[in-house]
Image (spheres, rainbow, N blue to C red):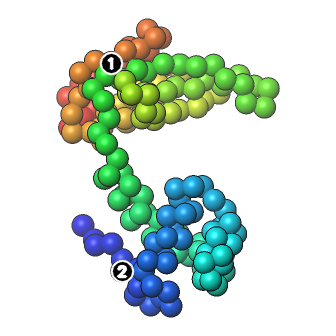
Amino acid sequence: MKPAPDPQYRHRFPAEIISHAVWLYHVFSLSLRDVELLLAERYVVVSYETVRRWCKKFGESFANRLCRRRPRPGDKWHLDEVFIRIQGEQHYLWRAVDQDGVALDILVQPRRDAKAAKRFFRRLLKDLQYVPRVIVTDKLVPPVIDSDAHS
């Protein structure tokens, strides 16, 4: 595995400022210009284009650190289907939620497709090292748990 790039290598600003700008952009879903303004309030003059380059370069390592710090999902999962309207058209929202209400993953599609929902659930299980204790569905799509899904 390749180590994370050094934030100070070939950069004018210290690593703390770069990581703070990337943190602001990703955690609060701010625009690049908003991050530029927030840094300017702290007397750090940097353009939004520089912030964009920092986010592009260091965003993946930042996201990986956030995923590692995220608590493990609960052992009771709910998989349900919700009908929503987007610009007047009916869509289907497949949602996997743990017992604490934390959304594990979502899938929005224009057609009701049980095969895609099963694929969605398999993909969710694939990245885990454990199997949930209980899976509650709305009986539209039976959950598929096999040895290939989480190995």
Residue in the foreground of this view, choosing between 13 and 132: 13
Residue behind mark 1: 135
Q: Residue at x 58, y 31 (%)?
A: 108
Q: Residues within 10 Å of mark 1 (few under 14, many from 20)?
A: some
Q: Residue at x 63, y 59 (%)?
A: 30
Question: Taking 52 as reference, is 19 left or right?
Answer: left
Percent position of residue 129, x then y = 21, 39
Vertical comparison of 73 with 33: above or below = above
Residue behind mark 2: 6
Q: Residue at x 43, y 8 (%)?
A: 139
Which quarter of the rendered picture does the C terminus lie within? top left
User: What mark, if any, has residue 118 been given in the picture?
Assistant: none
Q: The residue under label 1 is which amino acid type?
A: Ile
Percent position of residue 36, x then y = 65, 73
Vertical comparison of 142 with 85: above or below = above
Query: Marks 1 and 2, how far apart in space?
Result: 42 Å
Percent position of residue 32, x then y = 65, 67
Question: Taking 95 as reference, is 34 left or right?
Answer: right
- Which residue is at the far front? 42
